Image (cartoon, helix red, strand yellow):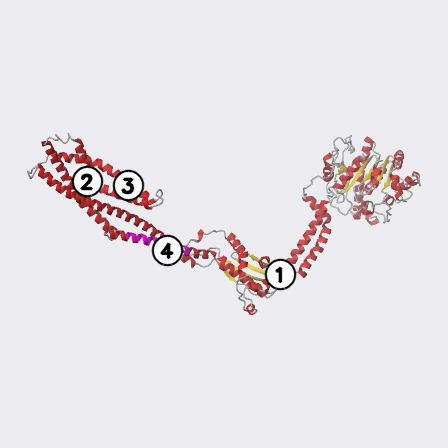
Amino acid sequence: MMQSNQEPNHYRNGNAGVPAYTNGGGGGGGGALVPVGNGMEPSPASMGGNEGAGQVDPKALLNAFRRRWFLAVTVGLFCGGSAAAAVYLLVPPNYVASSIVYIDATPGTVLQDSSSFSSDFDTFKRTQMFRALQRVVLDTALSEPVRNSELKRYGFKTIGDLPLIKAQAFPIDWLEARLSASGRQEEFFAIKMEYSEKPEELAEIVNAITQVYYRDIANESKLLDKKRIAMLIELSDDYEQETKKKLDEIAKLGRRLGITSEEELSLDIAADNAFSRELQQQYFDLTIMRYNLKLETRITEKIGDTVEENPDIQAEMIETLIDRDPKMADLLVKADAIEANIRRYEETLKDTENNSVLKSARREQETTQEAIAKYREELRPIIEQKIRESGNAQNPDDLPAEERIARMDVILEQLKEELDNRKIQKTQIVTDSFELQQLQKEAAKLEARTDEINNKIDVLKIELGAPDRIKVAQWAEVPRIKDWESLYKKSAMAGLGVFGLFVAAIVWFEFQAKRIDTLGDVTGGLNLRIMGALPQMPRWASQKSSKAKKTAKSAFWHSVLTESIDAARTVLIRDANVESTRLVMVGSAISGEGKTTLSCHLAASLARVGRNTLLVDCDFRKSNVHRVFGVEEQPGLSEVLLGTASLEEAIKSPSDDGPDVLPAGQFNSQLLAALAQDGLGKIFEELKKKYEFVVVDSSPVLPVTDSLMVAQHVDAVILSIRRDVSRRPKVAATRDRLAMLGVPVLGAVVIGLDGETSGYRSGYGGYGYGSRYGYGYQYNRSPEPTPSQS
C-alpha cells in the first residue's frame, strides 16, 4: 500500500541514531551482530513490495530451484517417465522408406568454365531439398504409374490409386506431413517417408516423388537449354531467310549492272570514268577554243573589245567549263545518285529520323557537297589561265572564223550528247552500286548474327552431353523392419520435454512467490532496518537428546544463537531507553517464520541480563509458549480477558532467572469479542507497571485479525523474517497493515540470512496455520516442539 509523504512517522527506526545490526560472521559461524543498516525511514515507493517488477533475477531463479529442486525433480521424473512410457506404448513404430540423391559440388560442363557458376553449394543443396518436396512435385507424383509388380497385380495403375493415398481426404497435405528431406553428408540428401503400415506402398510413393523431382526439377537447366536451343534454331532460320532475301536482291542488281562480282563492278566503273574524263577534256579544250574564236569574231564585228571587257560572258563560260571537268563531273554524278537514294529512302522508310542507312546517306551527301565546293574553287583559276592562253594561239588551218566555229559546234554537240548519255548511265550505275553496297552490308550483318546464333546452338548441344549434376544414387527399397530407434528418440524427447516443463513450471511458480533470500531483499526491497540476524540452526543442534547436547558442535550452535539474540536485545534496550518502547509485539506475515522462537529467546535474553520480563502468548489459535517453558496452558490470557481468572493466577514463573510467562489459555469464540473491546489494553497497562519489558508473541498478521487487534495496544512491533519462507509481497502487506493502524515497526529480525551460516538449510519446521485458523477451531495438541520449529 502506497503512503504519501505527509504520512505520520509510524516506522520508528531509531531517531537517536541507533544503528541496525546483523551477524558479523565471526570465526567459525555465528558471531556477534554488526551494523548493516543506516536507520533511514523507508521510502513510500517501497511500500507495495513490487520492486523489480517485470525483471527476472537469475540468482532468484537459482534460489527458487534450490528450495524446490527435490519436488521439481520428483514430479518431473514421474511425469516425464509417464510421458515417455505413453509415447512408447501408444505411438506405433514406423517403417521408413528413403531414396538418396547425389549432388555434384562442381557443375559438370564440357566447354563452359565451371568457376562461373555460383560457389554457394550449401544454398544450392538446401534449395534442392526444398524443391524436392514442393506441392507441384507431390501432385505430379500422384499421376506417376505404379512400377511395383506386386502392386500392379492388385490393379493399381497410378500412385494416386494406392490405398494409402485413397484413404486420405487431402493426400497432398498428408504427404507433406510425413515426408522429409535431410542431408547430413555434403553431396547427398535423402527423401524419406515414415508410416506405420504398408511398406510396399511407402517405397513406391518415395520412388515416384524422386522420379518426378529428378525428371522435372533436378536437371531443370538441361531442359531449359533444350528450350533455348529450339528458340535459337527458330531465330537462326529467320535470319537465314532474311539473308537469303538480301543475297537475291544483290544478285538481281548485279545482273542488271552486268557484273558478277564487286571487283568486276569496280573495274567497269574505273574504265568508264577514264573514258568519260577523256571526252570531257576534249569538250573542255574545244569549248575554250570556240569561245576565244567567237570573241575574236565579236571584236571584228565591234560587239565587244576584249574578254576582260565582258565579265558576264567570261563568268558563264568559266562555270560551264568547271561543270565539264571530268573530276567535277564525277562528283556531280555521285551527288545526284546520293540524292536519288535519299529520296527513295524517304519515300519507303517509315522512321526517317532514326534509320541508320538514311543517316549514313545524308552524311555522305554533306561530304560530297563539301568536296564539290572545294574543287570548284581550286579549278576556277586554272580555267581562267587556259582561256587567256587559248586566246593567243594561232589558227593552224587558216580557215575563216565562221567555218571554224561551225565545225566546233558540230563536234561540241556530238561530245555533249555523248557526255549526257554517259552521265545518265553513270548516275544509274552509281545509284545501283550504292544500293548494292548497302545490301552487302546488311547481308554481312545478318550472316554474322546467324553465325553467332549457330555457334551458341553448337555450344548448348555439346553441353547437353555433359554429365548430370544431380543423380539418383539409390532408389527406395521396401523396408522390412520398423524404425524402433526413432521411437526410442521420440520417447526420450517426450520424457525430457515433460520433465523440463514440470521442473520449469514448479521453479517458476516458486520464483513468483518472491521469497526472501538475501539481506538486500529486506533492506532494499522492503526498506526495513535489520535489528538482528539469527543463524539457521541445523536440525541436529536443536534435538533434545543428551548426546546431542553434550557435543561440542551443538554447544557452539547454541552459543551462536544466544549471541545473536543478545545483539537484538541490545537494540531493543537502546530503543526502550530512547523512546520508552517496553511493550513489544513479535509478529510475522504468515506462519512458519519463527516469531515464537524469536519471542521466546528475546524474552529469555532480557531476563538473563536482569530485566524484569514477561512473555505473553497472544497466539490464541495455536499457542506454543507454554510448551517451550513447560507450564500449564490454563488459566491464561483468555481466561483473564473473559474474567474467569486473575492476572496473578494466569502468570507463571518457570524459573528464577527466566522470564515470567502468561500463556494464551483456551481459545473460543467469546475470546474474539473480548479482544475487540478495551480489556486487553487495560491488561497491558497493568503489566507495564509490573515489568520492565513485556514481549508479546502474536498470531500471523495476514491469516487472521487477532494480531492486528493486539497490535493496537503495544508500543512497537518487531517482524520475524525467515529465509526461504517469508515472501516479500506478504511482508510488505503486513508492514502496510500495521502502518494503517498507526503501529510503529522497529525493524526486522532475520533468520538464516547471515552470510556465514547460510549453508545450513535444515532450519525450523513449518508453522502450520493454513486454513486451520477460523472460528470454532479446536487445536489438536502435538508433541512439544523445539524452539527452532515455531
Left or right: residue 345 versus residue 507 is left
Residue 189, position as x, y percentages in the image: 53, 58
Q: Is residue 241 magenta?
A: yes
Magenta segment boundaries in residue numbering: 230-250
Left or right: residue 468 versus residue 332 is right
1 vs 2, front mark: 2
Q: Is residue 186 visible?
A: yes
Quadrant housing the N terminus:
top right
Question: Residue placed at 70% from the left, 44% from the top?
Answer: 60
Task: Identify the residue under disc 3.
Answer: 365
Q: Earlier in the sequence, mark 4 or mark 1?
A: 4
| Front residue of 110 and 91 | 91
**Element type at marker 2?**
loop
**Element type at marker 4?**
helix
Could you tell me the amino acid type at mark 3? Gln
Task: Identify the residue under disc 4.
Answer: 237
Question: Residue placed at 81% from the left, 37% from the top?
Answer: 717
- How busy is the neighbourhood of tag 3: few (under 14 within 10 Å), some, or many (20 plus)? some
| Front residue of 781 and 31 | 781
Left or right: residue 266 versus residue 716 is left
Task: Identify the residue under disc 1.
Answer: 485
Could you tell me the amino acid type at mark 4? Asp
Asked whether the beta carbons under mark 1 and mark 2 sit within 8 Å of each other, the answer is: no
Which mark, residue 325? 2
Q: CA distance from mark 1 to mark 2?
A: 108 Å
Q: CA distance from mark 4 to mark 2?
A: 51 Å
Q: Earlier in the sequence, mark 1 or mark 2?
A: 2
Could you tell me the amino acid type at mark 2? Asp
Q: Earlier in the sequence, mark 3 or mark 1?
A: 3
Question: Residue placed at 72% from the left, 47% from the top?
Answer: 509
